Amino acid sequence: MLIGEYTHTIDAKKRVALPAKFRKEIGKKMVVTQGLDGCLFLYPVSEWKDISKKIADMGMAQADTRGFNRFILSGAVEVVPDSLGRILIPEFLCKFAGLKQKVVFTGVHNRVEIWDERRWRDYKKRINSQADMMAEKLGETGML
């Protein structure tokens, strides 16, 4: 399971070291793509195959489904860490996520999210202030 939060620096060539704990769990190949809420999603290849199949199985009859397929799949790139454990994040994905100098890797069960440090702090502050309300809603559905 991918959990935790780690801050790293992205270099001028758009390379960033994947946290060692995540490297062990993800393996030698991974897929990075546009994520939700302004971050990138990073999946182990095995998990990516499952995710992409589920997305493909949604069909293409509805505009929302076609749009989501395009959003997730067209932005996906397979990456392999170099000998120092760094991955190269393509420029278009760096721009999408607003990645500047510091990035935050967050483990979210089956994926890693890659955030610009400032964007992550703002998002985390907002979510933290709503945690009680979200827990109540989930409790009403029987999830908690």
Image: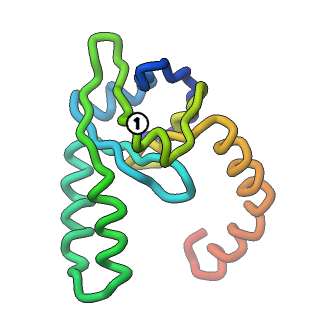
Q: Residues within 10 Å of mark 1 (few under 14, many from 20)?
A: few
Quadrant in which the N terminus is drawn: top left
In the current view of this chain or complex, which residue is farthest to the bottom? 61
Q: Which residue is mark 1?
A: 91
Q: Establish if 103 lies above or below 36.
A: above
Q: Establish if 53 lies above or below 117.
A: below
- Residue 17 appears in the rendering: no
Residue 64, percent from left and from top:
38, 81
Query: Which residue is found at the position 35% from the left and 17% from the top?
Result: 85
In the current view of this chain or complex, which residue is farthest to the top? 84
Quadrant in which the C terminus is drawn: bottom right
Query: Which residue is found at the position 32% from the left and 78% from the top?
Result: 65
Report the side of 88 relative to 126 (left or right). Answer: left
The quadrant holding residue 134 is bottom right
Q: Establish if 86 lies above or below 133.
A: above
Residue 127, percent from left and from top:
71, 57
Query: Which residue is found at the position 26% from the left and 33% from the top?
Result: 79
Residue 14, percent from left and from top:
43, 26
- Residue 72 appears in the rendering: yes
Residue 44, percent from left and from top:
28, 41
Q: Amino acid at mark 1?
A: Glu
Q: How is the image coloured?
A: rainbow
Q: Which one is in front, 84 or 111? A: 84
Q: Which one is in front, 52 or 66? A: 66
